[in-house]
Image (tube, rainbow, N blue to C red):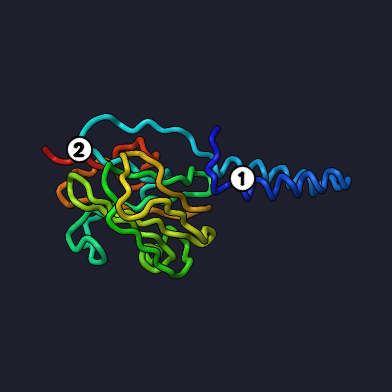
């Protein structure tokens, strides 16, 4: 199983601590360290995904549960009516984020903020977050990585001018968190509230014919 590079320091530190306690004869701390190391390997797993081949679709940018699905006026970057879909990632979900559609990165903005629980409505705009505007064949879209109460850092590996393919990895959020995606108002949403989705594979919307 592939491990996201962001997890290397966590896995390494807890593995070395486990080894230190084991060599020192401290069995219980060494067992705890091994268990934590195992969890870090599990949390930072980065499985391969196969994006759909059909045209005119948007895939989920994150693993997790759909907690918001509504039409809004996105006034920070897009300045137009959009579909907002928000996905909550628990500590048990894969936290690698993927591009919902192919396009060119127009803007990446890091906004400092609070650390409310990621499933709360106010977390979307008030929490620490990184916003990425993507120029696509179907219009500009916005993807917002939102840090949560436990997650204190989002990682975005792209910059303006970079190209992304549908389902391509572009970042991650450490520990429980959420991801908001704002799609053109004319698309047809294909998921429902509380549905579980998989990054890079689950189709969340289609362009209407």
Q: Is residue 168 above or below residue 126?
A: above
| Residue 113 spot, x, y in % from top left | 44, 70
The furthest residue to the right? 25
Q: Quadrant of residue 198?
A: top left
Q: Circle 1 sits in a helix, a strand or a loop, which is it?
A: helix
Q: Which residue is mark 1?
A: 40
| Residue 132 spot, x, y in % from top left | 33, 56
Residue 56 is tagged as: 2
Separation of marks 2 and 1 at Cα, in angstroms? 36 Å
Q: Is residue 125 above or below residue 193?
A: below
| Residue 185 spot, x, y in % from top left | 17, 52
Q: Is residue 72 above or below residue 42?
A: below
Badge 2 vs badge 1, beta-carbon distance below 8 Å = no
* Any part of residue 18 in sight: yes
Tell whether 115 sits left or right of 207: right
Q: Nearer the viewer, residue 129 or 205?
A: 129
Question: Reading the chain from its start, which is encountered first: label 2 or label 1?
Answer: 1
User: In the picture, which quadrant includes the N terminus?
Assistant: top right
Residue drawn at (38%, 44%) of the image: 98
Residue drawn at (50%, 38%) of the image: 46
Residue drawn at (20%, 37%) of the image: 56
* Any part of residue 68 in sight: no
Tell whether 46 sits left or right of 8: left
Q: Circle 2 sits in a helix, a strand or a loop, which is it?
A: loop
Tell whether 134 sits left or right of 172: left
Residue drawn at (29%, 38%) of the image: 203
């Amino acid at each position: 199983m592939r491990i996201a590079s962001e997890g290397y320091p966590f896995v390494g530190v807890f593995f070395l601590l486990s080894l230190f306690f084991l060599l020192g004869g401290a069995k219980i701390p060494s067992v705890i360290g091994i268990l934590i190391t195992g969890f870090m390997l599990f949390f930072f797993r980065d499985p391969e995904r196969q994006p759909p081949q059909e045209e005119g679709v948007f895939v989920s940018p994150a693993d997790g549960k759909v907690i918001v699905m509504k039409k809004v006026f996105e006034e920070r970057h897009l300045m137009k009516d959009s579909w907002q879909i928000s996905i909550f990632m628990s500590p048990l979900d894969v936290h690698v984020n993927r591009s919902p559609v192919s396009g060119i990165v127009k803007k990446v903005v890091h906004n400092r903020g609070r650390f409310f629980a990621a499933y709360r409505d106010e977390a979307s705009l008030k929490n620490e977050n990184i916003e990425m505007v993507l120029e696509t064949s179907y219009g500009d879209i916005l993807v917002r990585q939102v840090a949560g109460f436990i997650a204190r850092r989002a990682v975005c590996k792209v910059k303006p001018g970079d190209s992304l393919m549908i389902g391509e990895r572009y970042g991650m959020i450490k520990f429980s968190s959420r991801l908001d995606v704002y799609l053109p108002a004319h698309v047809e949403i294909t998921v429902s509230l509380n549905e579980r989705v998989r990054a890079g594979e689950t189709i969340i919307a289609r362009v209407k014919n």
